[in-house]
Amino acid sequence: MLKYSFSEVYHNKSVPIIDFKEKGNLFYKLVPLKPLRDMRVIEGPIEELLKKENYKDTNLEDYIRAIITNEEPIYDAIGQIRKIYPNTLRLDIKNSKSELNFKSYFTKIDKIKHKSELELFEEFFEFQNNVKLSDKQKEIMKDIINEVK
């Protein structure tokens, strides 16, 4: 049996080998499976994940879930990771902006009907960026919203 999801990354897969001897006498053993490509999770700042000393003794053909921990946006993070690990299947961002409490944000959905377009955009912007709109950004958004209406 092989690993089929990243939830199984730390599972050790094996197959039982059963040797039937004379009646009532059998022998069995578990033989660990060594796949051609394993599933792995790598995590850290992208600069560290791309350093040769951090991947030189690993199987670069493994199936990878990369978790990038940089605070600033990374241009083409998946492309950079795939230059080293061509079988990268998933890329996640884990930083102060991504760890906001999603549940508490979506419980406010009932109040959406009573908010203006600008208020909704302000909340969206803060949710995505973990910072509030500046006064200048608010004015620009007011103009855009009025133009669209």
Image: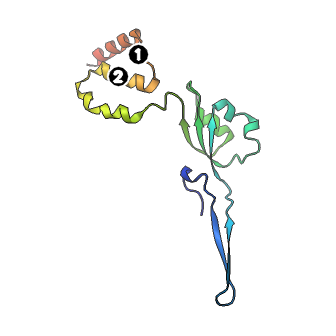
Residue 121: give its label: 2
Query: Which residue is found at the position 57% from the left and 54% from the top?
Result: 8
Quarter containing the C terminus: top left
- Whichever of callouts 1 and 2 sits on the residue coming sooner in the sequence is 2
What amino acid is at disc 2?
Answer: Phe
Query: Which residue is found at the position 67% from the left and 58% from the top?
Result: 35
Q: Local crowd at mark 2 within 10 Å, few (<14), some, or many (≥20)?
A: some
Hey, which quadrant is residue 13 in on the image?
bottom right
132, above or below 17, in the image: above
Hey, which quadrant is residue 123 in on the image?
top left
Disc 1 vs disc 2: Cβ atoms closer than 8 Å? yes
Hey, which quadrant is residue 4 in on the image?
bottom right
Left or right of 93? Residue 46 is right
- Of residues 81 and 110, the one drawn nearer to the viewer in this rendering: 110
Task: Report the Cα–Cα distance between label 1 and label 2.
Answer: 9 Å
> SS at mark 1?
loop
Residue 65: give its label: none
Q: x and y percent of residue 137 in the render? A: 40, 13
Left or right of 118? Residue 26 is right
The total of numbered circles placed on residues is 2
Q: Local crowd at mark 1 within 10 Å, few (<14), some, or many (≥20)?
A: some
Query: Which residue is found at the position 54% from the left and 33% from the top?
Result: 94
Q: x and y percent of residue 124 in the render? A: 38, 25
Left or right of 73? Residue 54 is right
- As drawn, the residue found furthest toward the left would be 114
What amino acid is at disc 1?
Answer: Leu
Q: x and y percent of residue 113 in the render? A: 23, 28
Residue designated by label 1: 133
